[in-house]
Every structure is written in structure tokens, then in C-alpha cells.
Image (cartoon, rainbow, N blue to C red):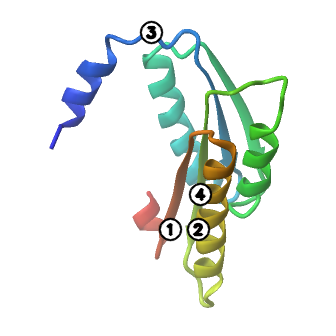
Amino acid sequence: MKSSFDIHAELADYDFSEISVAIVQSKYHNDITDALYQGALDVLKFYKVGEIFYRTAAGAFELIYAATDLVYDDELMLDGIITLGCVIKGDTDHDQYINQAVTEAIAKLTLESFSPISLGLLTVNTKEQAQ
């Protein structure tokens, strides 16, 4: 198995200056998703990705709509999308329904559009786990 150092070394030879990527961040649990966003942005900047677009979604479920809107935006012509969100288990099973719906919708959108969409959705039991 390759280490992250091996992967970084391989990617260092590529020119990402012509690549355009959008990051979609859920604003629910923004203390967590802000950190996810900053991490994703740091990596894209490290590799000198050409264009980085930013969108927000109200919550994890709304990542579906935001990603769909970006995929079919003919003006942007994105090379990829990064979705970021956090769902923390509560007293009900809502987390399972949201997590499953978002995961299935993003997978379906990826397959139907032939667009690479990463699913950065934390699905945790506690806020401490997310941190």
C-alpha cells in the first residue's frame, strides 16, 4: 500500500494549473466543516490547482442540490467537486437517513454525469469524534 508521502511525490510531477474544482461546504456544524474546508483548500493550493470555486449548502442533505447545480453549470465546466459536511448522531435515527440519502445521491450523480465528486461527509456519533 502506498503511503501519503508516495502519493504526494507522484502528484508533484503533474501540472494542475488548468484544473478547476469546486468545494461545497455544508454550513451546519460549521465549526467542523470550516476545518474540512480549510484542509481541502490547503491541499488544492499546495498542488496549484488553477481555479477553485466555493459554494455553501445549508446542511448535509443540501449538498445533493449544490453538487447537482455545479455539475450541470455549463459556464463553469468543472473538473471535479468536493462536498464537505458533518452529520452527528442525535437521539433519533435522522443521521442514518441523511447519510444514506446523501451518499446514494452523490454516487448516482457521479455515475450519471461522469464527473468526479468526492464525498467528504463525516458521519460520527459525537462532536468530539468529528473534531
**Mark 1 or mark 4: which is in front?**
4
Residue 73, horizontal then vertical, whole percent: 83, 33
Q: Amino acid at mark 4?
A: Ala
Q: Are marks 3 and 2 in contact (CB under 8 Å)?
A: no
**Res. 88 image quadrant:** bottom right
Q: Are marks 1 and 2 in contact (CB under 8 Å)?
A: yes
Q: Are marks 4 and 3 in contact (CB under 8 Å)?
A: no
**Res. 91 image quadrant:** bottom right
Distance, label 4 to label 3, CA atoms, is: 27 Å
Distance, label 4 to label 2, CA atoms, is: 18 Å
Q: Which mark is residue 44?
A: none
Q: Residue at x 68, y 27 (%)?
A: 78
Q: Provide the residue designation for mark 3.
A: 15
Q: Which mark is residue 107?
A: 4
Does 45 appear above or below 13? below
Q: Residue at x 58, y 11 (%)?
A: 18
